[in-house]
């Protein structure tokens, strides 16, 4: 499956803009959510092919939302890449245990992000 539709979940407008800009310039269709609850609604309404998930957000954090996605039979096949400033190895391991397929630390390097997406396609 070639990935085209990507959902960015991040409470930072700057980060959403930065990631959207990279992805749109590379031919992806992008939607965004400011927090986990909004992300879960958008996933139900218009199933993305990939989710870029921040961790530190108001309400449910990215670990909780990723776990909910991974445990739901309707969404468990959507890959999640955590994109976060949480740079401890324990955070990375915890994110992968919640169901993320990869873990990137901010600031996101565009080439690294695009390579990770290409490896999923």
Image (cartoon, rainbow, N blue to C red):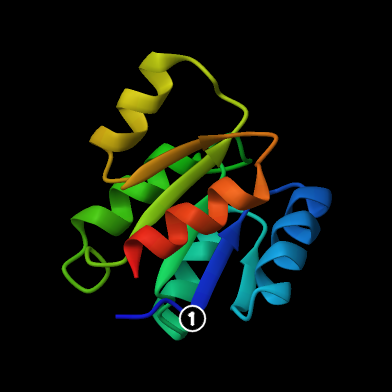
Q: Residue at 76% across / 47% down in the picture?
A: 12
In the picture, which quadrant includes the N terminus? bottom left
Residue located at (20% from left, 55% from top): 71
Left or right: 84 with respect to 70? right
Image quarter of the C terminus = bottom left
Residue located beneath label 1 in the image? 4
Viewer-nearest residue: 107 or 31: 107
Q: Is residue 36 visible?
A: no
Vertical side of 26 occupied by 107: above or below: above
Q: Secondary structure at mark 1?
A: loop
Outermost residue toward the left? 73
Q: Quadrant of residue 106?
A: top right
Residue 103: x and y in percent read 43, 38
Query: What residue is shown at x 32% (from left), y 26% (from top)?
Result: 94
Residue 88: x %, y % from top left: 48, 15
Q: Could you tell whether 31 is left or right of 96 in the image?
A: right
Number of marks in picture? 1
| Residue located 43% across and 64% down the image | 118
Above or below: residue 72 compared with residue 11: below
The answer to whether residue 50 is seen in the rendering is: yes
Rendering coords of residue 76 (x, y %): 22, 63
Q: Is residue 38 left or right of residue 40?
A: right
In the rendered image, the vertical position of residue 49 relative to residue 102, given as above or below: below
Q: Tell which of 72 and 120 is nearer to you.
A: 120
Residue 25 falls left or right of residue 9: right
In the displayed structure, 8 sits above or below 12; it is below
Q: Position of residue 63 (x, y in %)?
A: 40, 38
**Other residues around mark 1 within 10 Å, as few (<14) / some (14–19) / many (≥20):** some
Instruction: Name the quadrant containing residue 70.
Output: bottom left
């Amino acid at each position: 499956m070639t990935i085209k539709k990507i959902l960015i979940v991040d409470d930072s407008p700057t980060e959403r803009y930065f990631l959207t800009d990279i992805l749109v310039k590379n031919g992806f269709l992008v939607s965004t959510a400011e927090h986990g609850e909004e992300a879960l609604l958008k996933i139900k309404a218009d199933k993305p092919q990939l989710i870029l998930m921040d961790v530190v957000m108001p309400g449910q954090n990215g670990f909780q939302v990723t776990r909910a996605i991974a445990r739901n039979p309707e969404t468990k096949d959507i890959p999640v890449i955590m994109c976060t400033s949480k740079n401890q190895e324990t955070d990375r391991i915890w994110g992968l245990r919640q169901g993320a397929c990869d873990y990137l630390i901010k600031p996101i390097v565009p080439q690294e992000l695009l390579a990770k997406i290409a490896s999923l396609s």
